[in-house]
Image (tube, rainbow, N blue to C red):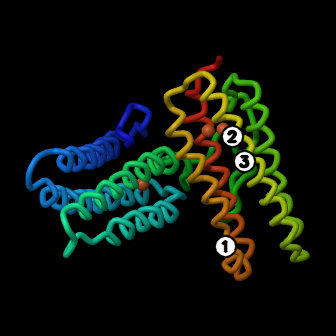
Amino acid sequence: MFTFTKDCLIGIADIDQEHERLFELIAQTDATLKSEDDSVTQAIMLIGELKQYAASHFAHEEAYMESIGDLELNRQKKEHASFVAKVNSYSFSGVTDETAKATILELLEYLSKWLMGHILGSDIMIGQFTTTSKSASAEATPISNKPAIPVFTDEFLTGIALVDEEHKKLFDIIGKVHKAIQTELVHDKFDSILDIIGELREYTCIHFADEENYMREIGYDGLETQEVLHQMFIDKLNDLDLNDVDDNQEAYLYDFLEFLQNWLVNHILKVDKLIPVK
Ligand SMILES: [Fe+2]
Ligand SMILES: [Fe+2]
Ligand SMILES: [Fe+2]
């Protein structure tokens, strides 16, 4: 199970403290289940506490994001809502202690993984993309909802040759997606945009596998976390909903693209750059 480490720190004291407390509650529930009598009843109470604490944490985080004009707010709200829905989908009434225990352990596993992925995949971006600031790597101020094309600069170098080469190629493909949305949408050649997104998906998988192999080779202890983050990103790429896209192609695609590049930029700067150079 994942626990809070210094890598989870996003640099906003109140939010960091709340994240730490959430991990503590998960660990406490786990320890309770593995201890003596009455542990299931107590664990169920702790799950209730965890639910409440998570709800108030999400409210704090969203209010903070709103106050700084964070452009990722809507996406974060959706992710928080999916967490709440998942926790609420579990019911422990009318089941045996044994079933409840197994269910809670499964839930705790999911929660710790989700929390780690969410903190390092989304919360880590808080304050990076706001109405008053923009990414250091973006070449121009976005016009309306159109994100700026990310440019690969030295600040993204990890020092691991293969990884750097592949990150550069990912930036190139994202540049191609931008171009395709701009030129192809005019002619409604939606298929060719999807082809390039397909290329991005394929290359992302190749890159993640290579990066993970490198981390495995050097015995890096951050491998498991990276695997979770990579999988979450692949899931997002696979989530592209074609029905939604048909309605308002441009806005949808730019929103999707913005998420992909913001995620990638942050992942490289805050997570990949921690990987030691062999
Ligand atoms: Fe969050
Ligand atoms: Fe990477
Ligand atoms: Fe990575």
The amino acid on which the numbered mark 2 sits, given as a three-letter code, is Ala
Rounded to the nearest angstrom, the CA distance separating label 3 from label 1 is 19 Å
> Where is residue 66 shown, x and y percent of the image?
42, 60
Q: Look at 40% across and 57% down and name the residue there.
A: 67
Look at the picture and state if 22 lies above or below 226. below
Q: Which of marks 3 and 2 is nearer the N terminus?
A: 3
Could you tell whether 162 is left or right of 184 in the image? Answer: left
- Farthest-out residue, top: 278
Image quadrant in which the C terminus is located:
top right
Q: Residues within 10 Å of mark 1 (few under 14, many from 20)?
A: few
- Dot in front, 3 or 2: 2
Other residues around mark 3 within 10 Å, as few (<14) / some (14–19) / many (≥20): many
In the rendered structure, which amino acid carries the disc numbered 3?
Answer: Thr
Whether 3 is drawn above or below 99: the answer is above
- Ligand 2 within 8 Å, label 3 CB: no
Q: Residue at x 77, y 48 (%)?
A: 203
Residue 10 locus on image (x, y percent): 43, 39
User: What SS does tag 1 mark?
Assistant: loop
- Which comes before the other along the chain, label 3 or label 1? 3
Above or below residue 66? Residue 94 is below
Quarter holding ligand 2:
top right
Q: In which quarter of the image is the N terminus?
A: top left
For this orientation, the residue located farthest to the right is 187
Name the residue beneath numbered marker 2. Answer: 209
Looking at the image, is mark 1 or mark 2 earlier in the sequence?
Answer: 2
Rendered location of residue 114, percent (x, y): 43, 53
Q: Distance between the residues labelled 1 and 2?
A: 25 Å
Q: Name the residue beneath numbered marker 1.
A: 241
Q: Which mark is residue 204?
A: 3
Residue type at the position of mark 1: Asp
At mark 3, the secondary structure is: helix
Q: In which quarter of the image is residue 13?
A: top left
